[in-house]
Amino acid sequence: MRGTLALVLAGGRGSRLMDLTEKESKPAVPFGGKYRIVDFPLSNCINSGLRRICVLTQYKAHTLIHHVQRGWGFLRAEIGEFVELWPAQQQTAAGSWYQGTADAVYQNIEQIQTHGADYILVLAGDHVYRQDYSRMMASHLRAKADCTIACIEVPREQATAFGVVHVDEDDNIISFLEKPADPPCIPGKPDRAFVSMGNYLFSADFLLGALEDDARNPQSARDFGKNIIPEQIGKARIVAHRFEESCVHASHTPEAYWRDVGTLDAYWAANMDLVGVTPDLDLYDPAWPIWTYTVQRPGAKFVFDEDERRGMAVDSVLSAGCIVSGGSVSRSLLFHDVRVNSFSEVEDSVLLPGVDVGRHARIRKAIVAAGAHIPPNMVIGEDAEADAKRFLRTEGGVTLVTPEMLDKLDA
């Protein structure tokens, strides 16, 4: 792994998360009570023994840059370990920002060459999962591949929303299809398909040559899934790596956990899984910790113990700095510095940092964005029509509330 350079592509907006990514990129969005989404690929690198990491940023990167600087500066450059930030700098003659995932790498080709890596691991910076990349490397070397793509099995009917990999019986990739209406099945599994996770391991010389070829094609969208991979199929050895072989499983389930969390419904559901008795994503595993930067706050506090005014939380995750002051929290996840005031109720909800829930307010099945102050007596999540008029309500019945939406109600 010392001969490998990891490139974490963290410049995407994540527009399907709507107002959650109005001020920061999708990889910077908080997740799981104390983390940000980008912490997962970064932690996977560290835990896999990969210590040369570059984070490529673009869209509204201020929050992301601060987080990486504060939380990921513990490696020692003098022994060849680092997490570097590579902001978009319009480094080609065209003077454009990144046009696609492949262009993000191509525009940094000179920096990549200075590191002299034998292998380049390109990672999506906006997915939640635990993976041992050293096992993916072993698969790459055994296959003597030019490119290895991490793939996860999904039902065929769900594969239409992803890039689908068509393989033969030996997991050689014979085609790569973006969001096909009729996804090809996995050999021997007619109801299952292979979906690309957006993680690619390249032999360095092959990748740099493929990027140079793509840069000369004026019709290219400069994207790995749409251009680089399909163009090289049949010319190079490109294989699929089964995620189940390198996934770091929770001890109680064999499921290969990977979540895109690219929509509000998916984001809500993935956070809600964490409040269950045995979540599919095990964040308590000391053998594979998820590293992060977090503010220093005292432990969560619960006050008042009266019949109608009891500070309590059940089936919930509360982060440091939270105060439940005579309110009740159930089946919910609260980030740091959330305050739930007297006589209020929070159920089946995700409250991001700094949310304040006023007295007698009721919140059901909602995502409340950072810094929002819910007025006293406000009811959210019980009247779909009213929620749709005031806030943003998803097809899955989740209500998104932001400070800006609340300000409009007062205007």
Image (cartoon, rainbow, N blue to C red):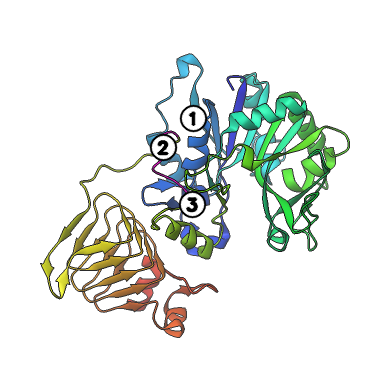
* Lower sequence index among marks 1 and 3: 1
Q: How would you rate the neighbour count of disc 2 (Cα within 10 Å): few for under 14, some for 14-19, many for 20 or more?
A: some
Residue 356, by quadrant, is bottom left
> Taking 145 as reference, is 338 above or below it?
below
For the record, the magenta segment spans 280-287
Residue 135 lies, in percent from the top left, at 62, 30
Residue 263 lies, in percent from the top left, at 55, 62
Q: Can residue 120 be seen here? A: no
Q: Nearer the viewer, residue 355 or 91?
A: 355
Q: Is residue 125 magenta?
A: no
* Lower sequence index among marks 3 and 2: 3
* C-alpha separation, residue under disc 1 versus residue under disc 2: 9 Å
Horizontal placement of 184 versus 87: left or right?
right
Q: How many marks?
A: 3
Identify the residue position indicated by label 1 in the image.
46
Residue 186: assigned label? none
Q: Are marks 1 and 2 in contact (CB under 8 Å)?
A: yes
Quarter containing the C terminus: bottom left
Identify the residue position indicated by label 2 in the image.
291
Residue 24 lies, in percent from the top left, at 47, 52
SS under mark 3: loop
Horizontal placement of 137 versus 404: left or right?
right
Mark 1 against mark 3, which lies toward the viewer?
3
The residue depicted at 18 percent of the width and 70 percent of the height is: 342
> Taking 46 as reference, is 398 above or below it?
below
* C-alpha separation, residue under disc 1 versus residue under disc 3: 22 Å
SS under mark 2: loop
